[in-house]
Amino acid sequence: MIPSAAHDSYKIAKIWTFFCILTLLFIIAIQKSSYFEMDAFGIWILSCLAVIYLSRKNTGQLSIAPQRTVIIIGFLMCVLSFISIPLGITHPPYSIGEFSLLLSGIGVLVFGLFNFRSLIFPVSIPFIAVMCFGAYELFLRNQDWITAPLIPFTVSLTTTILNGIGIQTITNGNYISFLSQNGDVINLVIIGDCTGIISIGTFTIAVIIVLTTFPQSITRKSLGLIAIGYIGTYCANIGRIVLISLSGYFFGPIGVIEQVHIHIGWILFSAWMIIFWYYYFTRQLGITFSKKRITNDSGNNNN
């Protein structure tokens, strides 16, 4: 075991953050980016921010028995990352989901060995997120009623916006149809995944990370901001559908609309997450990410 008092938790946290971001960007670069990859990357960013913030304070220590348990759990998390696909927890091919299980396990091992107690949970969040999404996906296969109530509302809101900007639509259940500028028929099908349920799940994980890292932020005002966050997350999804529709309207049913469908979701959601959480951290928590503030805080911890 490595005594935590002999090491600078803030320095180790910064090294860990750099390692995480570098390896995750590599995984994203060698794979075809998708909505899930960017969701996972966003969760890792929040996890690393939580690790850095907590490392600037007294991280606390585990006694010998709990520390050994944490190290064993970290090792088992790493093992699970290699067998999650055969077990059916995740799906092939190997992607950022399986890598998140491995990276999170490594983090638990590292902070367990250094005995930084408060850093163990935030570094475990991506692992928990992947496992929860796996269970959630399995649940959705047999429980479509979760998203079913959102589909009519999503269709109605989308068609209202499209009609409002001059694109006359025809709806039939969860189908939206309209003509492109060239006279081609554009058909959109709104299914469960189009309701923004995945984005809402990702936002919920982000909320859990923030509220567990900053329990002092649980106030009426912060809960009101989080409610706005959920509304904004759903609106970002509506914006995604509208932009997909506009790409079909201007460029036809093939080509551009397919690329917009693939990429616009994670772009809008990532932009919303950055804007919302930056505002939350700076205005609600009073945290600044400037170098001067970090230096002062770390200096105070060394006194």
Image (cartoon, rainbow, N blue to C red):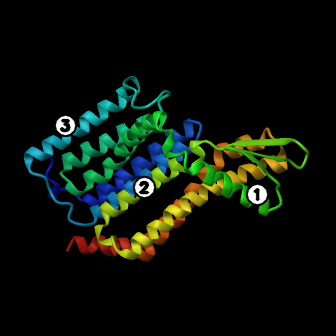
CA distance for labels 3 and 2? 28 Å
CA distance for labels 3 and 1? 54 Å
Per the rendering, the mark at residue 303 is: none
Q: Judging from the image, what secondary structure is the residue with disc 3 in?
A: helix
Q: Judging from the image, what secondary structure is the residue with disc 1 in?
A: helix
Residue 260 visible in the picture: yes
Residue bearing mark 3: 72
Residue 8 in picture, x, y percent from top left: 24, 59
Residue 290 visible in the picture: no
Q: Is residue 169 left or right of residue 215?
A: right
The mark nearer the N terminus, 3 or 2, is: 3
Q: Circle 2: is it few (<14), some (14-19), or many (20+) Cα within 10 Å? A: some
CA distance for labels 2 and 1? 29 Å
| Quadrant of the snapshot with the N terminus | top left
Quick check: 50 above or below 142? Answer: below
Circles 2 and 1, Cβ within 8 Å, touching? The answer is no
Image quadrant assignment for residue 105: top left
Q: Is 82 in front, or is 171?
A: 171
Comparing labels 2 and 1, the label whose residue is closer to the camera? 1
Residue bearing mark 1: 162
- Three-letter residue code for mark 3: Ile
Residue 248 in picture, x, y percent from top left: 79, 46
The residue sitting at 20% across, 65% down in the picture is 58
The residue sitting at 47% across, 65% down in the picture is 277
Residue bearing mark 2: 204
The mark nearer the N terminus, 3 or 1, is: 3
Comparing labels 3 and 2, the label whose residue is closer to the camera? 2
The residue sitting at 25% across, 33% down in the picture is 76
